[in-house]
Amino acid sequence: MAQLNWKNLKAYGQSSLLPLVTALAIAIFSSLQVIVSSVDDFPSSLDFGEALFDAMIVAVATPRFWIIAGVLTLLHWMHLAYQHVFKHQIRASWLRFLGSLDTALIVLLTAWVWVMTSIFVFNPDPMRNQPLEPTIDLELMAQQWTLTLHYFWQFLIMAAVVFIYYWMNRYQFIRKVLQRHGVYVYLLSSTLWLLITYPLFAYLVLQLPLNIPEQTLLPSEDHNIFAGMNLFTAVTVWALSTPFILAFERQQSAKEVAELQQGKAEAELKMLQQQVNPHFLFNMLNGLYALCLTGSSKAAPMLLKLSDLLRYLVYQGQSERVPLSEELAYLQNYVELQQMRIGHRCQVIWTIDVKQKEVEIAPMLLIMLVENAFKHGIEPNPEMGDITIEAKVARTEFVFCCCNSVASTPNQTLSSGIGLKNLRRRLELTYGSQHSLQSKRSGSQWIAELRITL
């Protein structure tokens, strides 16, 4: 288990490096652009290896790299949280919101607002002194906090316009129009929406104090709200958001389908557990009933043992995982109860080699093999029988073997009945391909071996 956890932790750490590496690549590329633009005779006069090293040093030393790395890392953590929510079926709405596409876009737009605010704070009279120097100075922003707020809320309104386009496209046009009426109606309604709204939003942006007579914040850079460049920008935002929304919606639908299938499998697993438990209880109550009829002194101790077994059955039998030590203790209690009922016609030999206390398995799996050994091997045989039970953990594999003498009565097969079929189905639902179960006759013995990858 520790080895598997270390592997998961290692894979998790490696995936977390991806945002940092991506941010570093972006920063290096930007630095290389500056270096190359400063060289007259490129590429002959430039040592590319030295330029790459210099670009890396400059990239790491700039605040831009750390800002990009922080934003990408935050998005990565949001993505992992979103996967965790669906994997573990967490219903908390705030966790789902953290991992949603809406939150990712909000983070990106907020980062853009901060970057633009910083650039405008660093450059005096930015609307008239262009092009602007792309510099982020957090200390200057803190010193001139009133100017920072002045720029910040204006860029925040522009980001809100972009988010409104995205929100309308996703929740109104894609989810309602596209899904219900098809592509043609979606294209027509989207065109109508863009033609009506783009001059309205352009007029809203023109009301911001940053606009001056010579220069505006509109893509057209003038005061014409009907300019083609403004419409082109609105169409671009709409067109770029559509494939991301469609891909995300498809992924979300696939996860919801997987969640439903998992829920169905879990419901089937619970049903199988409920079928196993009455099967075991029925056998034991029959034996207790027979002892009570004969007035045997074994009835009271047997009833006490049965009470201990039922307590484990109620409190641990429905759990997803239980400690292996508790499952083996339950198994030993069951064997003692069976020996009390059968008498001295059965000899049980135990070989337990489990030193790892942290090992856990699904409950009520081993009991089926031992119960079959008593039911098909010991009870039909009037002569002395024997059962050998071995349990061990070898590295990351748990091996359980139950070997019993075969009764002399004909047509005795451990594969008959509902018990073993349920066990195979439970193993398939719980462990998938990470298990193997073999049950076959070998000479005068019947051997059932279960292997589970932990």
Image (cartoon, helix red, strand yellow):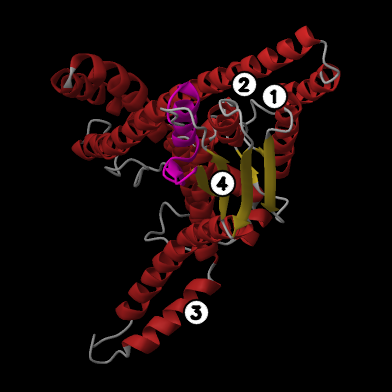
Neighbourhood count class around disc 4 (C-alpha, 10 Å): few under 14, some 14–19, many 20 upward: many
- Residue type at the position of mark 2: Phe
Q: Which residue is mark 4?
A: 401
Q: Quadrant of residue 331?
A: top right
Q: Earlier in the sequence, mark 2 or mark 1?
A: 2
Q: Secondary structure at mark 1?
A: helix
Q: Position of residue 150 (x, y in %)?
A: 57, 42
Q: Amino acid at mark 4?
A: Cys
Q: Mark 3 = which residue?
A: 57
Dot 1, how many residues are within 10 Å of its Cα: few (below 14), some (14-19), or many (20+)? some
The kind of residue tagged 1 is Leu
Q: Nearer the viewer, mark 4 or mark 3?
A: 4
- Mark 1 or 4, nearer chain start: 1
Please tell me the numbered disc located at residue 313.
Answer: 1
Q: Marks 2 and 1: CB-CB under 8 Å?
A: yes
Q: Secondary structure at mark 3?
A: helix
Q: Residues within 10 Å of mark 2 (few under 14, many from 20)?
A: some
Q: Nearer the viewer, mark 3 or mark 1?
A: 1
Q: How far apart are the alpha carbons under marks 3 and 2?
A: 70 Å
- Viewer-nearest residue: 356 or 400: 400
Question: Of callouts 3 and 1, which one flags the residue occurring earlier in the amino acid sequence?
Answer: 3
- Residue where numbered disc 2 is placed: 280
Q: Is residue 141 above or below residue 207?
A: below
The reply to whether callout 3 and callout 1 are in contact (CB within 8 Å) is no
Instruction: Please determine whether, in this image, residue 422 is positioned above or below residue 427.
Output: above
